[in-house]
Image (spheres, grey):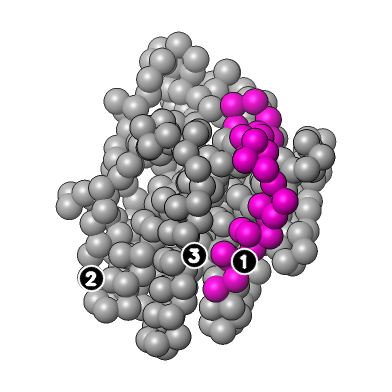
Amino acid sequence: MQTVLCNNDVLYGILNYARKPISHLSLNPSLSRKAKQMPNKARVAIKVFDLDRSIAFYTRCLNFKLVEFQPDAGIAYIRDSDDELVLLASPHLEDPRSLLDEHRQVFKPGDTLDFFVDTFETQHARLVEDGLTDMRVEENERGERKLLVTDPNGYHFAFVIPVKRSPEAMITAYAGLSDDIAAALDGLTEADLDLERAPNEWSIRQIIHHLALSTSLSLMSIETVLVNPGSVFVRPPHDQEKWVEVLDYKHRPIGTSLALISAVQAHITQLLRSVPNSWDHSIVRKFTTEDEGHTATLSDMITIQIEHTTAHLDEIRQTRKIHHR
């Protein structure tokens, strides 16, 4: 099971910045909803076992909206809680990527999809009333509350109420991420880095390389919003799983990735302190020049980095617990 953080580069769509490496996400600490623009086509596909049953679950239990159902083609389109268009694909549709717009991302049963919300009390009450038992409410040591729901296909939907932080608290939390990573890895051997939380999930080693990628990719957009607020920032999408394979996340030592994470985070922390009063400044982020894009504030970007990293560190801690490390 991989986790996807919604509102992250599709992660600013459904399914953000991957905790799956979700990140979509919309990745919320949500993007500034008032300026968020809808894509003409879905950028995300969810492979399901039964379209009818899945549509019924998503619309009734999760309050997603059915947009179009094409039973003969084995597909349906829904809008999720962030109003993002999502393609549901039946098993006989081997590769739904051709039906997706950039950034193309396909999820499979077992993945975890995170959505940031202001509250989930009404939704939780409705699920209880409907008799759904495969769900729970959790609160972590950071005070973050989440409603976890498992659908008929084995996807895990996490509706997260993020911690509200002041600018100074946000800087402190971001600046401490490198130390948090070091603490999560403390005492592990080189062989331990190849442990997985479950089959077909990323190993601890792969998670660290992924964090190096996401941290480094955040740098230019953060610098852009500080220097040129209101501008358009275009960054071509990347096939996350292809990067994992081609860049050999499975075998490479993690030393250089840890150094990269530490250096970029220290650099960004210095910038945040040197260019104050920029938290509400925003840019329009696009994958292509033709893309309508979405608006993201500096506060959105830093919050996403904090939540994304801490979510992956939770996965590393869970992996250590499972393997008694």
Q: Quadrant of residue 218?
A: bottom left
Residue lying at 51% horizontally and 47% vertically, measured from the top left: 254
Q: Amino acid at mark 1?
A: Asp
| Residue bearing the label numbered 2 | 231
**Closer to us: 40 or 65:** 40
Looking at marks 2 and 3 on the same chain, the residue that comes earlier in the sequence is marked by 2
- Measuring from the top left, give residue 228's x and y in whole percent: 24, 76
Categorize mark 3 by other alpha carbons within 10 Å: few (<14), some (14-19), many (20+). Answer: some
**Is residue 190 located in the magenta-colored stretch of the structure?**
yes
| Mark 1 vs mark 2: in front | 1
Residue range corresponding to the magenta coloring: 175-201
Examine the rendered structure and indicate whether residue 283 appears above or below residue 155. below
Query: Which residue sits furthest left?
Result: 289
Sequence-wise, which precedes: disc 1 or disc 2?
A: 1
User: CA gap, disc 1 to disc 2?
Assistant: 33 Å
Q: Amino acid at mark 3?
A: Ser
Note whether 236 is above or below 141 in the view shown: above
Q: Which residue is mark 1?
A: 179
Please name the amino acid that badge 2 sits on: Ser
In magenta segment, residue 225? no
Q: How many marks?
A: 3
Residue 196 appears in view:
yes
Residue lying at 49% horizontally and 18% vertically, measured from the top left: 90
Q: Residue at x 41, y 15 (%)?
A: 94
Q: Residue at x 54, y 82 (%)?
A: 167
The C terminus lies in quadrant: top right
Q: Quadrant of residue 146?
A: bottom right
Disc 1 residue crowd, few under 14, some 14–19, many 20+, Cα 10 Å: few
Task: Please give the label number shown on residue 262.
Answer: 3
